[in-house]
Image: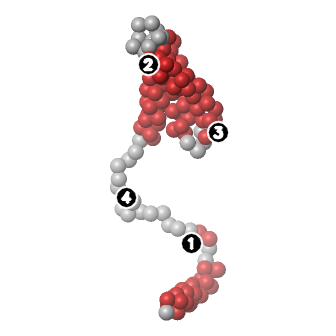
Amino acid sequence: MATANFQARIERINRAHKGLAPARKNAPIRALRSQPVPMSARRTGRRRFPILEHIQPMAMGSVLGCIAAVVLTGLTSENSPWGPGTDLNEMLFLPALAGLALAPILMLASLFLASKRPGFALFSLSYLSGLVITMLI
């Protein structure tokens, strides 16, 4: 029964389109294009500012880069709670070095993904910048 209903529907669609086919052949291409949506029918939502979309990855990258740099600086400082000879030093040493090694890897990956994901390129650039500037201070 479902097959019979489906076939009947296909037949109705084909009959409806059969009458439209000659009109489409003679119509100019401009008439076949979709018309622009009038302003009254468009959704009136909140406009997004493109600059705000780029601030989030930049802020996140710089904050994470600063945190990684502070941890790395604290690993070598004698007076820090996670300085040399403490248990925290042994626990944070490898993750901190991984955070340092992650910066150039992110930059190289962003070279390939910059056109598809511009936010990732901004994140990796600000991560490297935050890391380097904080370690220089």
- The amino acid type of the residue labelled 1 equals Ala
- The amino acid type of the residue labelled 3 equals Phe
Residue furthest top in the image: 78
Q: Residue at x 51, y 26 (%)?
A: 95
Earlier in the chain: of badge 2 and badge 3, it is 2
Foreground residue among 38 and 60 = 60
Residue at image mark 4: 43
Earlier in the chain: of badge 3 and badge 1, it is 1
Left or right of 31 in this view: 74: left
Residue at image mark 3: 112
Foreground residue among 46 and 105 = 105
Q: Quadrant of residue 32?
A: bottom right
Q: CA distance from mark 2 to mark 3?
A: 37 Å
Image coords of residue 135 (percent x, y): 50, 15
Image coords of residue 57 (percent x, y): 47, 35
Foreground residue among 104 and 120 = 104
Give me the disc on residue 88. 2
- The amino acid type of the residue labelled 2 equals Leu
Residue at image mark 1: 31
SS for callout 4: loop
SS for callout 1: helix
Q: Is residue 51 visible?
A: no
Q: CA distance from mark 2 to mark 1?
A: 72 Å
